[in-house]
Image: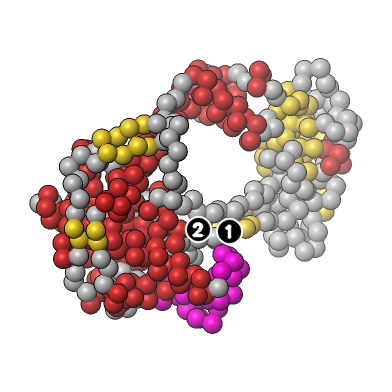
Amino acid sequence: MKKRTVALMLCAMMAFGAAGCGAKDADPAATEATESAASTEGIADSTVSGTITSTPCASSAFDLKGSDYVTLCDYSAIPVTITGDYDVDDQKVKDYFKQMFDNYGPFYMADPDKTTVEEGDIVNVDYVGKLDGTAFSGGTAENQNIDVYQNASATGTGYIDGFTDGLKGASVGDVIDCDVTFPDDYGNTDLAGKAVVFTFTVNSIQKEMTIDDVDDAFAKEQFQVDTVDEMYDQIRSYMESSAEYNKQKDTTTAVQNYLIDNCEAEVPEDYLTARVDDYRRQYIEQNCNGDESQLADYVSTYYGKTVEEMEAYWNEGMEKSIRLEFIMDAIADELGVEVNQDDIDTYAEQLVSQNGYESVEAMYNIYGFGDTDYGKRYFADLYRYDQALDQLLETAVVTIDPSADTESDAVTEDAADATEAGSATNASTTYEAAEGTEKTGAAN
């Protein structure tokens, strides 16, 4: 199954992506637990792991052959131009690391010239929290960088009042007991209102690292490799894989655009209406709790559109999706593409594992607009189309020209946007799910 990470972009038209939500357990010394979840173009997590309800959909009543609606172009050696930069050299690797270093920093290292904690210092400590002389769960940490005078972690997460008071003016090597009382409304009821003792060991006073300070210890801590050279090798490998993925993705998009532009394809109005109606129904179920009266507020809030504008947007994207499906169905027929059910089942199970669906049936349920049986048939069709697409990608004549002035309104990208579709098979090919998380803890 070649190009599996790319070819199933075709499935994006009808698949739905789940925007993640995340939260971290709060450290007992943190001010409060924070969590956030952002969902912009996807559906709630319950769609992936929730109860399956098989609802017959209007689309399932149709059994259409693409060859009845398509006049194909010559697809034997599709000429396409892609415009990305797919080369990776030493300078790009260094630049990428510099960007990572700046974005994820600041990073700290021990300052050998400082021995006493002063205002503005970042201090590295170990600590153990004890209640009635016994260490309590979540109250122990090592190698924590904290801003003593701000009573916060080095990244700004605040602590309960008095947590760092005993460290002011401390010296490297000191072991200090700090009496702290948790607030009455603290989230952990076992600690709320309780007086505890935190025992700190002052390991070092820190200074901010520059990129010239990066050494093997940094590489081991941040990248889990033994040397700086291995760190750069790891970054290069990632960049090369990413470049190859982008090259394949761009080629796939260009080939699909070529087919759309050069093949003639009609879409029966009743079939288009059925597909859009099915999508609309499932969209309301998944984003508006099944309450159609919430749709206007939802699309206005998240997309700044009226319901009529959103429906026109869906309609446009769905029509493009169906045209491409018809074209690929006709091509698959001409190429004599046949698929093995065992391969389909294996691939479906792989996607379930990769994308967090509760089961294969849950994934089919999404593909089928709530109709699991139809979703299974539709998924098999898309798999077959992708086998045909793989053959077209093998014979395509690809020119790489980063300077070319090409239009950016790719068919698959437009259609995916128009249906808010993140590919159920590989969500990263069509949109990036917004996942908002805030880390909490006693220290970073």
Q: Position of residue 153 (x, y in %)?
A: 74, 41
Residue 147 x, y percent position in the rendering: 80, 37
For label 2, the residue is 19
In the image, residue 115 above or below residue 166:
above
Q: Nearer the viewer, residue 318 or 360?
A: 318
Q: Residue at x 81, y 17 (%)?
A: 113
- The local secondary structure at tag 1 comes to loop
In the rendered image, the vertical position of residue 75 relative to residue 286, given as above or below: above
Residue depicted at 23% across the width and 47% down the height: 389
Q: Amino acid at mark 2?
A: Ala
Query: Amino acid under label 1?
Result: Ala
Q: Is residue 259 left or right of residue 46?
A: left
Q: Which image quadrant for residue 68? A: bottom left
**Residues drawn in magenta:** 281-305
Q: Is residue 368 above or below residue 73?
A: below
Tell me where residue 109 sits by quadrant: top right
